[in-house]
Amino acid sequence: MQEDTVDQIIVVSTNNLSAQRATLRTYERVNGKLERKFAPMGAVVGYNGIGQNKREGDGQTPMGTYDMGMAFGTAAPPRGTRSTYQRITSDDYWIDDVNSPDYNQWKRYTGNPSSKWNSFERMNIDLYKYGMVIEYNTNPIVPGHGSAIFLHKWRGSTSPTAGCVAVSETDLVELLKWIDPKKSPTIIITLEDHFMSELDRYR
């Protein structure tokens, strides 16, 4: 994607590669210029921090720049949500079985999931009351390079994730109402010392 076509940017930065706590900043292009949107938000990342060589089950959040995908949740979408929103049911799973052709995809299945996949993540959980897909390892999908990377609700400000980015429910709702697919929303996951140079590519 061309940098000058990106009009909404989320930057998630940590103080070092092993840090579990992060800062989330938001920017929007107004009259051709990037401006800060919300005050910085607290966030958490994977229990093994962030890294450039994400692998399945390593507990890291992938560094890099990614499109923001569809929104989802066990609850109805917050009023004002503009992204495509998938309501979660008890039959929804995200597949992390590296030997399955369904790897890193959302699947709805009414049978016994253990008979179909060796490993899967149930979507119908409280942490996914609201969320958004971070388009990591989605096009193309490389088996074993990591799956189910989302922006979702945190357990708390000191509780890391298995590899996702998580924020408070209040902040997540604000983000869901702000993000506009027409503005090519993008997320940058990086180190605190690097985030300004990463952002400069879009100015």
Image (spheres, helix red, strand yellow):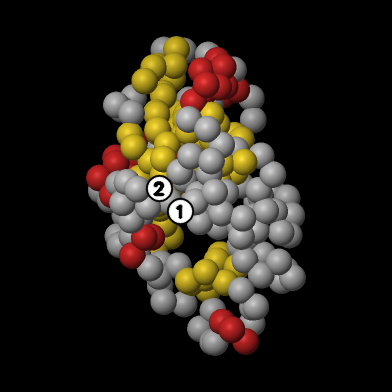
Q: Kindly identify the amino acid type of the residue bearing the numbered disc 2.
A: Ala
Which label is found at residue 166? Answer: 2
Sort mark 1 into few (<14), some (14-19) or many (20+) by Cα contacts within 10 Å. Answer: many
Q: Position of residue 58 (x, y in %)?
A: 61, 55
Report if the CB atoms under discs 2 and 1 are less than 8 Å apart.
yes
Answer yes or no: is residue 23 visible: yes
Mark 1, residue position = 161
Secondary structure at badge 1 equals loop
Secondary structure at badge 2 equals strand
Query: What is the count of numbered marks?
Result: 2
Which label is found at residue 86? Answer: none
Q: Position of residue 54 (x, y in %)?
A: 66, 48
Q: Kindly identify the amino acid type of the residue bearing the numbered disc 1.
A: Thr
Q: In which quadrant of the rendered view does residue 189 lie?
A: top right
Left or right side of 25 for 201:
right
- Front residue of this view, candidates 135 and 4: 135
- Rendered residue at 25%/45% (across/down): 170
Q: In which quadrant of the rendered view does residue 175 lie?
A: top left
Circle nearer the viewer, 2 or 1: 1
